[in-house]
Image: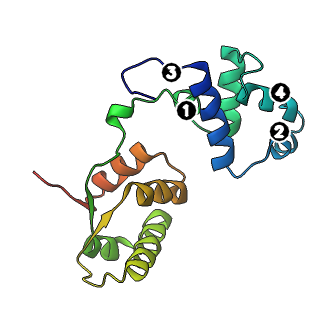
Amino acid sequence: MNPLTEPSIEDIAASLRAIRKQKGMTLKDVEIASNGRWKAVVIGSYERCDRALSLKKAINLAAFYQMPLDQLLGLENRESAPMNRKITLDLRRVRESSTTGNNFQFLATFTNLLCAKRRDWNGEVLSLRDTDLTTLALLLTLDESATLEWLNSEKLMLLKN
């Protein structure tokens, strides 16, 4: 979807399906996890554009998936999304902070795994790719924007001028 155009019904339906799959849920899983509030056939029909999704139901579905409505519907401002942005973590700060809380421990473990996978042993900085940011956000149970804000507020990113 072009960030400057209105989304189509198909774009919204695709976003609904993508979110459900990101959550690792089948249609039946949604029905079970919601104690029958969301029937598998109904969610499937929203995802196929066979049924209209009211605003009230969209708000309730966003609450069920524990995410903002605009993100559920694929309406978030894509111009402000972190895609193709260079994000460099200061690994020294990550190590210094890794004993101060769960998010720091998750970050330290995640960066150690990335360095090992990439065989990047410089130990000073680490560039995050878009997919790395997405994974980190999932680990921290934040969206990507909130993850960037947290990294920035904790002075864990090296900023480029």
| Residue underneath mark 2 | 34
Label 3 crowd bin: few (<14), some (14–19), many (20+), radius 10 Å: some
Q: CA distance from mark 1 to mark 3?
A: 17 Å
Question: Quick one: label 2 or label 3, which is nearer the N terminus?
Answer: 3
**Figure quadrant of residue 80:** top left
Question: In front of the other: label 2 or label 3?
Answer: 3
Q: CA distance from mark 4 to mark 3?
A: 21 Å
Under mark 1, the amino acid is Pro
Label 4 crowd bin: few (<14), some (14–19), many (20+), radius 10 Å: some
Question: Quick one: label 4 or label 3, which is nearer the N terminus?
Answer: 3
Secondary structure of residue under mark 2: loop
Disc 4 vs disc 1: Cβ atoms closer than 8 Å?
A: no
Question: In front of the other: label 2 or label 4?
Answer: 4
Q: Is residue 49 visible?
A: yes
Question: Quick one: label 2 or label 4, which is nearer the N terminus?
Answer: 2
| Residue underneath mark 3 | 7
Secondary structure of residue under mark 4: helix
